[in-house]
Amino acid sequence: MTNDLEKKINPDGIVDQLYDIALDPDSLGTFVDAWNDAGLDAQAARQTIESIDRFDTAYRAHLDRAETFLQRGAAAESGADLTATLTPFDTLAAFIVDRALHIVAANAGAEQAFGIEEGAALSALNLPADALDIVQASLKDVFRNSDSPDRLLKIELSGTSAPALFQVRKLEGSTQDDSEHALVVTTRYHWQAALGQTLKEVFDLTGAEQGVVRALVEGLDAKSISAERGTSEGTVRGQIKSILAKMNARTQSEVIRLVISLRDVSQGVEQSSDKSDESPVLVPADWLHAEVWKPFKTLILPDGRRMDYHDMGPITGAPVLYSHMGYGLARWHEPMIKLAFTQGLRIICPIRAGYGLSENIDPKADVLESTRDDTLHLLDHLGIDRLPYLTQGNDLIFAADFTVHHPEKVSEIIGLCARPCLAGDLHYANMGKWHRFFLSTAKHAPHLLKFTTRAAVVMARRLGAKEMFRQLNSSSPADTALLEDDALLPVLMANAQLIVGKSTNVAQAYTHEILATEADWTDLMQNCAQTKVWFVNGGQDPATDIATIAEYRDSYPWIDIEVIPDAGQMLIYQHYEYLIPKIATASREA
């Protein structure tokens, strides 16, 4: 056995491949094949090769250097993509200036609100002179004072009943040459042209009523609107009353919140510049589109980190806590949302640290403890006392940990293609090549995991989310078939941005999570024995085969496990008509 393995793997060759990956992340697939073919995903095999044992220690220095190359290459590839920095603020007026106070990037909201264009001096900003002086002075101070990189300004704007807020934040090393820039985000709402059409189709607002809604969103009161439109204040108040009735809102604030929630409907699905991610553009239609594409909500955690979360379904529905798995499966598509409303099911999905815009935890922090605390804070924020925990794939560890520490909060655990802890290496053998590599590497070569995870993210950005999805799930016909569903594809591609979007740093998060799932957490599972736990697993799951499911039954006989033969890891999208009513029943019983 040792001689055969020695022929298959050459430690010096691995070093060469590490640098190949750093220079060309697309070559990661070749490395994964070599690693798996050599049997290095099995601890017993690795221990029989003395040279590999020595090499595991020696090549860490090579890994560090290769990772430096990888990071430089990724930065060079992305270039000075300041426009991507503005992407999260597409409904607000936002722009970026350099140290010379020239505008180097501006979104449509800033161009509309302040009449500015890229390349112009900041003095071109359409602001009162005293307000412009305040903004310029604050920017100069932010650039000059590295200990105070943020400012929050209150600026009085003519024609509005409320001041606008300007947040000024320095962007360190924002481009390849490390030149300095500052981001300015304001509370001036960007009114998108298609939003008026959406308001007409969804709520039957007249043109005049759409104009009043826009004015309300932009901060004007009834008196200011009447002056601007040359009508009586009584006429405007009558229009506001009609708007409230048509939109089923009680206050003007509710109207504003609803309009902001419709922004993704009006702008459709953003198109990736990568042709491999091309997907049908959605046009404004009805409330169902609004529910699918509404923006995530944001919560500031006690330690100051930002955490986003998605809240789908009727706000008064029976809640379920839903984990998005490593694929970021946060959004559901229209037929799923419609069924959730029919069943009275509310889906609460925390976007875990490191995914999307949720800020990463400290690299030295305990990922289980942090995720547990973040989840508890969200439930307390929402006023939810008890609910089922719907978990997918590797995320089962988070459900088990949360249940053990807060059993009063979890009525039952529902695992979709869930992976409980198993001893030994046999369960890796029949996985798809990517799952086998990353999961076994976390267990037997953890020092390699961080580098290869970063490389995989860069590779996914180059290939495009659609092609990377196809490669990761190539052993599952049920999963790859989802890419042919034109109604679902835009949702899958939007979910993928939580992983491969330019604003994410998911490599650290995924590395922490996989290291935790591949360690021994049998005690967590055993301590959940008093909680109702049931699984629905797919026969085509690339991370779990039928023999492994039999191991689950042997190791945890108290878990009720159902298998759907023609389902893959994306079980929730393939059999939602069967699953959502069962989940809703569990939520109502909680």
Image (tube, grey):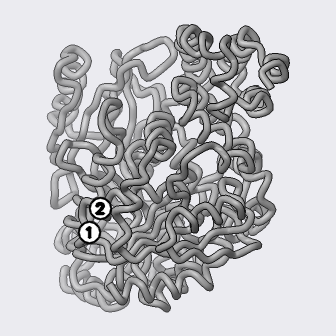
In the picture of the structure, the residue carrying the numbered disc 1 is 407
Judge whether 45 appears above or below 555 on screen: above
Residue nearer the viewer, 579 or 506:
579
Label 2 secondary element: helix
Question: Badge 2, how many Cα within 10 Å: few under 14, some, many 20+?
Answer: many
Question: Which disc is residue 386 wearing?
Answer: none
- Which residue is labeled 2 in the image? 404
Gap in angstroms between the C-alphas marked 1 and 2: 6 Å
- Helix, strand or loop under label 1: loop
Residue 211, visible in the rendered structure = no
Q: Position of residue 532 (x, y in %)?
A: 40, 77
Q: For residue 132, what is the image quadrant? A: top left
Question: Where in the figure is residue 290, as x and y percent of width and height?
Answer: 49, 73
Q: Can you tell which quarter of the image residue 52 is in?
A: top right
Q: Quadrant of the N terminus?
A: top right
Confirm or deny contact between disc 1 and disc 2 (CB under 8 A): yes
